[in-house]
Image (cartoon, grey):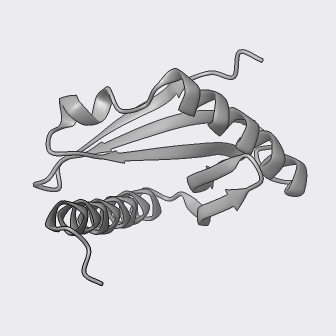
Amino acid sequence: MNEPASIQRKAARGRRAQRSGIDGESKVALALATSGWTIHGRRMRTAAGEIDIAAERDGLLALIEVKTRRDLDTAAYALGERQRRRLCQAAAILQGENPSWGQAGTRFDAWLVDAKGHMRHVPDAFRDEG
C-alpha cells in the first residue's frame, strides 16, 4: 500500500534535514581539529540524549551542539530550554563515563551552520544550572 504524498514529502524533508545536520557536524569537527582540538567523539549517545561533538584542548572539554539551518539567525534560535536540560543530563553521563576528560573544566558550546556552509561559534553558549 502506498503512503500518501504528504507523508512521503515529510519523510524526504526529514532525510534531507538529517543529512544537512551531519554535514554541518562534519564541517565543525574539521574546524575544531584544524584549530588544535582533539575530537573525543561525534554523535555520542547516552541514556539522556546525544552530544553532537565532544572535543578537548589544553584540558578544556567542550561539549558541542551543532545547529544547521537555512540561515545563522534561525540556527541561533533552535536551541531551546528543554534541549539544554537534556544536553546537561547527557553531559553528566558522558563525563561520568570519561572522568579523565575536562581536567581544566567543561563548557557547552554551540556552533551554528547555515545552508551555504557559513559557521558561527558561540563558546560557553549556556551553563548547567542544575
Residue 28 position within the rendered picture, expressed as x and y whole percent measured from the top left: 37, 57
- In-image side of 28 versus 86 (left or right): left
Rendered view: 51 above or below 86: below
Image point 44% across, 57% down: which residue? 32
Q: Quadrant of the C terminus?
A: top right
Q: Would you say residue 120 is visible in this rendering?
A: yes
Task: Please name whichever residue, 34 or 5, is drawn nearer the observer in this view of the structure.
Answer: 5
- Rendering quarter of residue 106: top right
Position above or below: 23 against 100: below
Q: Is residue 79 left or right of residue 46?
A: left
Residue 126 location, x and y as percent? 55, 22
The reply, left or right, for residue 91 in relation to residue 3 is right
| Total number of numbered discs in the rendering | 0
Please say if 5 is above or below 75. below
Q: Which residue does the image show at 74% across and 56% down from the upper left? A: 46
- Of all residues, the one furthest to the bottom in this rendering is 1
Front-lying residue, 83 or 120: 83
- Residue at the limit of the structure toward the left, as seen here: 116
Q: Quadrant of the N terminus?
A: bottom left
Q: Position of residue 44 (x, y in %)?
A: 64, 61
Q: Is residue 17 above or below residue 114?
A: below
Which residue is painted at 78% across and 51% down in the image? 94
Residue at position x 25%, y 81% in the image:
2
**Residue 99 visible in this rendered orientation of the protein:** no
For residue 75, what is the image quadrant?
Answer: top left
Q: Is residue 87 left or right of residue 115?
A: right
